[in-house]
Amino acid sequence: MSEAEKVKLVKTQNIFLVGPLGAGKTTIGRYLARALNRDFYDSDHEIEVRTGADITWIFDIEGEEGFRERETQVIDDLTQKQGIVVSTGGGAVLRSINRKILSARGLVIYLQVSIEQQLLRTVKDQKRPLLRTDDRLGMLKKMYQERTELYEEVSDLTCNTDQQTPRTVANKIIKALQ
């Protein structure tokens, strides 16, 4: 592949952000999209727009399985666009079909974050259904055990977000893409 072809590929290739809640996927995704002059989509936000309901309500009414069905449809739809940045929900990688879609249709970046940072970043967050528990630390550890291998499996690039500003992480990703 020539250098010009590589540059064109990077400019048109989709960028998908995966990682646990609190990793900064949405904020970093916005910075990336702005810096790269691309459209940005947040899969959770797209689900809310399409249903007219928030994620918590969907979990309450349809359960996690109903939510995951909606998530797969949104991921399938969004990833068919070209030259975009998408932040996925933390559990998007749980379904093998989502991992296949993401891998086939763009560059997947795993935003890694420690459990301690997740706790700090989500301490006041009441909107995440899986964190509506008395044992947030236990839930975060459980999700870490279930999902880390899947994030690693699907990713083309890993970037740790601990102790870094979203802008710094976005700039590191841009530098890695170049």
Image: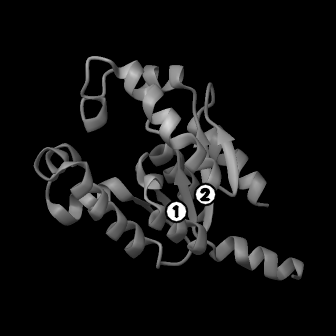
What residue do we see at 48% from left, 39% from top?
A: 146
Check residue 70 in the rendering and tell me which mark sits there, or answer none: none
Determine whether 97 is above or below 154 in the image. Answer: below
Please identify the quadrant where the C terminus is shown: bottom right
Q: Does the rendering let one see residue 128?
A: no
Q: Residues within 10 Å of mark 2 (few under 14, many from 20)?
A: many
Check residue 154 in the rendering and tell me which mark sits there, or answer none: 2
Image x and y of residue 93, in percent: 48, 54
Query: In the image shown, does 145 or 54 lie closer to the viewer?
Result: 145
Q: Type of residue at label 1?
A: Arg
Check residue 99 in the rendering and tell me which mark sits there, or answer none: 1
Please identify the quadrant where the N terminus is shown: bottom right
Image x and y of residue 55, in percent: 23, 48
Q: CA distance from mark 1 to mark 2?
A: 6 Å
What residue do we see at 73% from left, 79% from top?
A: 8
Determine whether 166 is above or below 106 in the image. Answer: above
Query: In the image shown, does 144 or 38 lie closer to the viewer?
Result: 144
**Do the residues bearing badges 1 and 2 touch, measured as CB atoms within 8 Å?**
yes
Mark 2 element type: helix
Horizontally, residue 28 falls left or right of residue 70, namely right
Image x and y of residue 50, in percent: 21, 66
Q: Type of residue at label 2?
A: Val
Query: In the image shown, does 169 or 157 lie closer to the viewer?
Result: 157
Ranked by sequence position, the earlier of labels 1 and 2 is 1
Horizontally, residue 62 falls left or right of residue 26, namely left
